[in-house]
Image (spheres, helix red, strand yellow):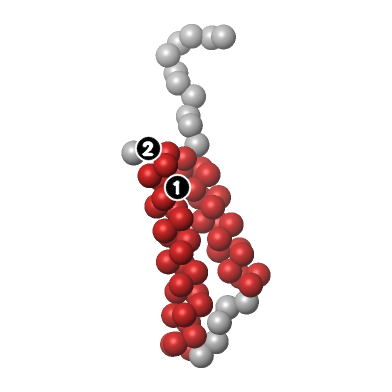
């Protein structure tokens, strides 16, 4: 899977998480999470994405 596809998946996950945290909780519980909690969730998903898309060094036995 290419790096671009991975970032597209990460972006869609962030959009879904934000929709659930705002509209979903407002409909079910009649309140919306504050901006700090929303930013925390966005940065957690972003951090997971950075780890997932990180390029691992090639182990081919050659030292530069």
Q: Position of residue 48 (x, y in %)?
A: 50, 50
- Residue at 55% across / 50% down in the picture? 47
Q: Residue furthest left?
A: 1
- Residue at 58% across / 69% down in the picture? 38
Is residue 36 placed above or below 27 in the rendered structure?
above
Is residue 3 placed above or below 11 in the rendered structure?
above
Label 2 – label 1 distance at C-alpha: 9 Å
Q: Position of residue 33 (x, y in %)?
A: 58, 78
Residue that label 2 marks:
2
- Say left or right for 62 vs 2: right
- Residue at 39% across / 52% down in the picture? 9
Residue that label 1 marks:
7
Q: State which quadrant residue 3 falls in.
A: top left
Label 1 SS: helix
Q: Position of residue 26 (x, y in %)?
A: 49, 85
Question: Which tag, 2 or 1, sits closer to the chain's start?
Answer: 2
Is residue 59 placed above or below 10 in the rendered structure?
above
């Amino acid at each position: 899977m290419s790096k671009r596809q991975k970032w597209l998946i990460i972006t869609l996950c962030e959009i879904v998480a934000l929709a659930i945290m705002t509209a979903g909780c407002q409909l079910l519980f009649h309140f919306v999470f504050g901006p700090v909690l929303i930013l925390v969730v966005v940065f957690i998903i972003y951090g997971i994405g950075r780890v997932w898309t990180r390029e691992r060094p090639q182990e081919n036995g050659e030292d530069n």
